[in-house]
Image (cartoon, helix red, strand yellow):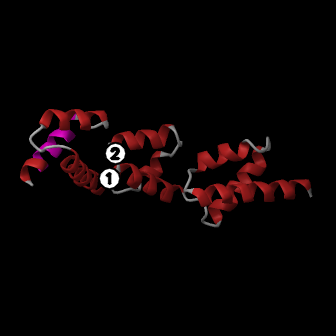
Amino acid sequence: MQKKKLFDELFDYGCKLLKQRDRSVFEIKEKLKTKTSSEQIVDKVVQKLLDLGYLNEYRFVENYINKYLAKGKNLNLIFYELKEKYKVDDETINKLDIGELKDKQIEIVVEIVKKKYNVNDKRKIYNFLYSKGFSEDEIETVLNNLVKK
């Protein structure tokens, strides 16, 4: 009876967390572990959240990437954060269309740079992009796209 009550409380807490925003499986597990020491019950709660579709690692990754791409963050930096901070596995990341994401990244960054800087001020643009985690090749691509448009 006690385990059932604990399970229900943890499930409700997990649902509450997921109402606020999508979260990774690792993040939910860590939050639930703060409420109990029973690893077994935490795993059962996470499995139920996954089975019901409330918790979805792929959806979390897509939303996270879209959120930070829109802010001009570099895709490689986003992938690094997903792996290190949220413990997302490579399999989930490999399901994404990386080529499409890189194209989208360039488009978004070009728009951000156009709004923020004079197109002729290449040094400021370079420094901005470098601070966002872009490589020199990626910065060159953005600068070339700025010149074209």
Say whether residue 120 is left or right of residue 95: left
Determine whether 4 is above or below 110 in the image.
below
CB-based contact (under 8 Å), mark 1 and mark 2:
yes
Q: In the rendered structure, which segment of residues is drawn in magenta?
A: 136-145
Q: Closer to the camera: disc 1 or disc 2? A: 2
Quarter containing the C terminus? bottom left
Q: Which residue sits furthest bottom? A: 52
The amino acid marked with disc number 2 is Leu
- Residue at mark 1 to residue at mark 2: CA–CA distance: 9 Å
Determine the image quadrant of residue 33. Answer: top right
Label 1: which secondary element: helix
Locate residue 40, reporting x and y percent: 77, 48
Say whether residue 107 is left or right of residue 89: left
Closest to the observer, 100 or 10: 10
Residue to which mark 2 is pinned: 75
Label 2: which secondary element: helix
Q: Is the magenta stretch mostly helix, strand or loop?
A: helix
